[in-house]
Image (cartoon, grey):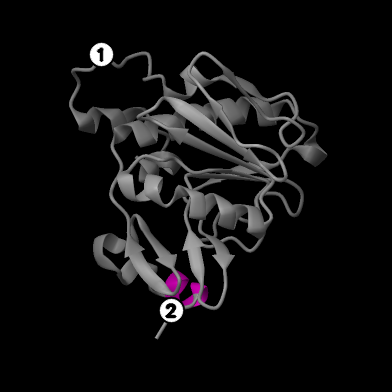
Amino acid sequence: MPMTAEEFELQRFDLPEAGRWHELHEGQPVLLSAPESIHGTIVLNLSRLLAKWLATQPPQQRGYACFGLGLPVERNPDTVYMPAISVFQGGVPFSQTDRTIASEVPAVVVDIASSNDRRTDMRRRTTAYLRHGVSLICVPDPFKKEIQVIRRNQHTLALGSWQTLEGGTTLPGFTVPVADVFAEPGWWDGKLPECSVIRDVPEHLSEDV
């Protein structure tokens, strides 16, 4: 019998690996491949850049970001995707922060194509986000070092490492060189053990590495 989004929320932590990297696809729990450390690097870079931009916004328009939050994008049967970053605007400030599955629709979704299963299913994922009401979808691809930018009723853009990602009307004034999204932290020399990567990640982001 297909699982509902509400049942998935209640039972997620009883799944293998304590529910980590699990999503609900058409009523069935699915374990996605664990991404490499570059996934956490992208989340860290974008979270810092978003934090700086959000701090410049008027308090009544500031918004906030959530990490690894479930989005119930389809019903009957239910599908819950868990993109890396969801940015919310309007509503009660930080109302989605402590939730496992969102009750509101984010304005922006960042879904990282950091494994083969995520990459091959990305068209279906982005289409579902648009139907769900998301205004701006960014898909960083760490293998191509490019970011796909998808907006409602507009052509998809594929930005290379020499180009700039702009927030447009959804995130007015937000700009970042694409290369900066994929840049390793300044202390990284390519020789440190993988466990060292986690030390530079804020506690609230450590689950995404």
Kindly check if marks 1 and 2 are in contact, taking CB atoms under 8 A apart as contact: no
Lower sequence index among marks 1 and 2: 2
- Does residue 95 appear anywhere in the picture? no
Q: Is 66 part of what is drawn in magenta? A: no
- Position of residue 56 relative to residue 189, above or below, is below
Q: Which residue is mark 1?
A: 189
Label 1 and label 2: CA atoms lie apart by 45 Å
- Residue 78 position, x and y percent, is 51, 72
- Position of residue 49 relative to residue 6, above or below, is above
12 sits to left or right of 136: left
Q: Which mark is residue 27?
A: none
Q: Nearer the viewer, residue 68 or 152?
A: 152
101 sits to left or right of 13: right
Residue at the limit of the structure toward the bottom, as seen here: 1
- Position of residue 177 relative to residue 100, above or below, is above
User: Please, what secondary structure does the residue beneath circle 2 have?
Assistant: loop
Q: Which residues are magenta?
A: 5-10
Circle 1: residue type? Asp
**Predominant secondary structure, magenta span:** helix
